[in-house]
Image (cartoon, rainbow, N blue to C red):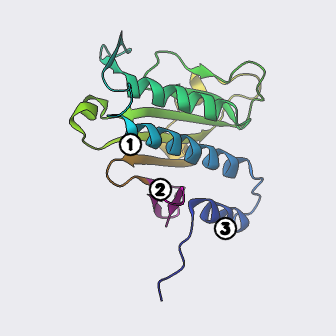
Amino acid sequence: MQPRAVTLSQFILQQERISPGATGEFTTLLHDIELAAKLINREVVRAGLVDILGYTGSENVHGEKVQKLDRFAHETIYRVLGATGQLAVMASEEDEDVIPVPVGEPVGKYVVNFDPLDGSSNINANVNIGTIFSVLPRVTREGSGTLADCLQPGQQQVCAGYVMYGSSTMLVYTTGHGVHGFTFEPSVGEFLL
């Protein structure tokens, strides 16, 4: 008999139950990171079939040519995480400035720094690419988050992880209590432990 598969959602909820003082805000944020990863994975898998390969015609802040899939990943993370109500601010490898929470959305107590699609120069070669993320507590007290919220030492991280897209898609993260890796099972649309 095979051991019971545990979904990422089930695992996150289990961790919330054993965490003193948990409010569900961090749980909601992790679920939204999972959703963004699923949406990006869908486009990575279909990249050769739809018009999402190649360059956008623009350059990012590092002078690199922006790939269409890179832009899609960036916009997806912004749209999904910006609407969670859990974030004060975001910062992306693709933008020179911090990314405020969209106007009209609630401002939360977390900060997410991310590289939407690391290794995007490999997209056309069908090599693994991935999303890197870091979750921090905000340090400013109110209003929209600032650069100071994003530029904190690594030991302040609440969570860090990555999603590797390829022949097998994995989401791996840590909150400082072990490293947890989940493999995406497309037939059920879930990341499984």
Residue range highlighted in magenta? 171-193
- The residue lying toward the viewer, choosing from 54 and 149, is 54
Q: Is residue 158 left or right of residue 86?
A: left
Q: Is residue 86 left or right of residue 78?
A: right
- The residue lying toward the viewer, choosing from 144 and 188, is 188
Q: Is 141 within the magenta?
A: no
Q: Give the percent coordinates (x, y) of residue 10.
A: 64, 65
> Looking at the picture, does residue 104 appear above or below residue 17?
above
Q: State the predominant SS element of the stretch in magenta.
A: strand
Q: Is 191 within the magenta?
A: yes
The Cα atoms of the two marked residues, 1 and 3, are separated by 30 Å
Residue at label 2?
Answer: 186
Residue at label 3?
Answer: 14
The secondary element bearing badge 1 is classed as helix
Tell me whether circle 2 and circle 1 mark residues in contact (CB < 8 Å): yes
First reached walking from the N terminus: tag 2 or tag 1:
1
Q: Give the percent coordinates (x, y) of residue 107.
A: 75, 29
What label does residue 45 carry, if any?
Answer: 1
First reached walking from the N terminus: tag 2 or tag 3:
3
Amino acid type at circle 1 is Val
Amino acid type at circle 3 is Gln
Find residue 136 and report its image quarter: top right
- The residue lying toward the viewer, choosing from 68 and 91, is 68
Badge 3, how many Cα within 10 Å: few under 14, some, many 20+?
A: few
Tell me whether circle 2 and circle 3 mark residues in contact (CB < 8 Å): no
Q: Give the percent coordinates (x, y) of residue 29.
A: 65, 44
First reached walking from the N terminus: tag 1 or tag 3:
3
The secondary element bearing badge 2 is classed as loop
The secondary element bearing badge 3 is classed as helix
Amino acid type at circle 2 is Pro
In the image, which is nearer the foreground, mark 2 or mark 3? 2
- Residue under the point 73% across and 47% down: 25
